[in-house]
Image (cartoon, rainbow, N blue to C red):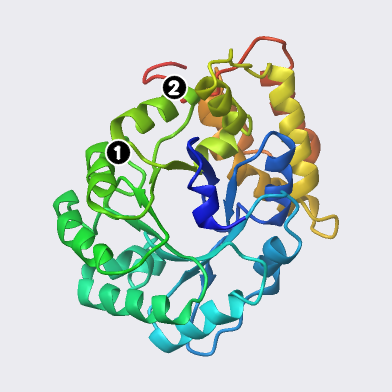
């Protein structure tokens, strides 16, 4: 299915955000089991002058288990290499090639890639032009509002409006704001009003309720969800239910425990030492733990365990129950 066809639907498109070292092939497969997204974005292909796409990320495209379209995301600033890589990726079954203009990791932006490019709008303009000329299919962009201040978005929008994009995903924070509590929904709404192509909203969509609020406030054609999907893999179906006027189904503690077991089994390689597998699971638990009733206690214990037995003993002590779980971040001050 093409990007144009997907976003011509009256229903908002729900996308799984690209998260490096998280949203890999096993994670896609697991998300699909819980209802899944409408559109999946790969981890970014980090393009350098002599770059060849990593097979591990390519597998998400060539072995896509979701039954839904996949978008290949690239990051970098070398014009020739970016164009060459985009053309190479189009030889695979991708719905689009996406340019990352939002990664806030210092190791990335200090090299003038990802969110770092937002400090150099002439370079962004040039890169967009080169990629649009190189890509024969759909070309999409994921951006933040600017590097340091949301007011930078005014000039950035003028750059985007010059190019024939097929979709713009706007993360409603600046690079400097990282993953802070506030998302500038008014700026996403500004993009919706200003641009002639679909705009997708990203940032702090953690529940069906926050999804509805983001859609109401922005008028966006879709929602991109990242950390909220790690915490709550049911979120895509919950949003669909809310949009359709159906009652929401909240998972029980044992449902969440079952998800963690499935995550462990799908995300961990049998050839990897147990301690390393547990360490990998901690990365996921940092997101999921924020939605538990005794969040601080859970995260304290999880971060200190080192064996599979210890890990699941902690999970069972918090989740072996049948109470419904909203999986929302605990309010400040709650233990």
Q: Which residue is mark 1?
A: 183
Image point (48%, 46%), residue name: 8
SS class, disc 2: helix
Q: Which residue is mark 2?
A: 209
First in sequence: mark 2 vs mark 1: 1
The crowd level at tag 1 (other Cα within 10 Å; few <14, some 14-19, many 20+) is: some
Q: As drawn, which residue projects farthest toward the right?
A: 270
- Mark 2 → mark 1, Cα distance in angstroms: 15 Å
Instruction: Mark yes or no: residue 311 visible.
Output: no
Please identify, in this view, whether the residue under mark 2 or under mark 1 is nearer the observer.
2
Along the line of sight, which residue is nearer the eye, 300 or 8? Answer: 8
Residue 95 at x, y percent in the picture? 58, 62
Image-quadrant location for residue 185: top left
SS class, disc 1: loop
Along the line of sight, which residue is nearer the eye, 191 or 17? Answer: 191
Image point (60%, 37%), residue name: 285
Image-quadrant location for residue 102: bottom left
Instruction: Mark yes or no: residue 234 visible.
Output: yes
Q: Taking 33 as reference, is 167 above or below it?
A: below
Image point (52%, 77%), residue name: 86
Residue 222 at x, y percent in the picture? 45, 42
């Amino acid at each position: 299915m093409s990007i144009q066809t997907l976003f011509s639907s009256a229903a908002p498109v729900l996308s799984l955000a690209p998260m490096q070292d998280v949203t890999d092939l096993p994670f896609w497969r697991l998300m699909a089991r819980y209802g899944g997204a409408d559109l999946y974005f790969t981890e970014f292909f980090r393009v350098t002058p002599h770059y060849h796409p990593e097979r591990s990320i390519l597998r998400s495209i060539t072995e896509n288990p979701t039954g839904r379209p996949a978008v290949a995301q690239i990051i970098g600033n070398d014009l020739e290499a970016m164009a060459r890589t985009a053309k190479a990726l189009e030889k695979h079954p991708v719905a689009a090639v996406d340019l990352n203009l939002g990664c806030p990791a210092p190791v990335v932006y200090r090299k003038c890639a990802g969110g770092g490019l937002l400090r150099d709008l002439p370079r962004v303009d040039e890169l967009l032009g080169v990629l649009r000329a190189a890509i024969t299919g759909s070309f999409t962009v994921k951006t933040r509002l600017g590097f340091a201040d949301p007011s930078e978005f005014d000039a950035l929008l003028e750059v985007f409006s010059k190019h024939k994009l097929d979709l713009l995903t706007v993360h409603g924070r600046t690079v400097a704001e990282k993953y802070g509590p506030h998302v500038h929904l008014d700026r996403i709404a500004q993009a919706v009003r200003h641009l002639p192509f679909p705009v997708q909203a990203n940032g702090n969509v953690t529940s069906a309720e926050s999804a509805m609020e983001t859609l109401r406030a922005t008028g966006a054609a879709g929602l991109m969800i990242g950390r909220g999907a790690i915490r709550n893999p049911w979120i895509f179906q919950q949003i669909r239910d809310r949009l359709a006027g159906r009652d929401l189904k909240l998972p029980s503690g044992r449902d969440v425990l079952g998800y963690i077991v499935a995550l462990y089994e799908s995300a961990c390689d049998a050839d990897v030492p147990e301690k390393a597998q547990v360490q990998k699971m901690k990365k996921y638990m940092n997101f999921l733990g924020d939605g538990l009733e005794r969040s601080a206690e859970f995260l304290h214990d999880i971060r200190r365990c080192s064996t599979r037995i210890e890990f699941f003993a902690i999970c069972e002590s918090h989740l072996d129950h049948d109470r419904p779980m909203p999986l929302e971040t605990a309010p400040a001050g709650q233990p």
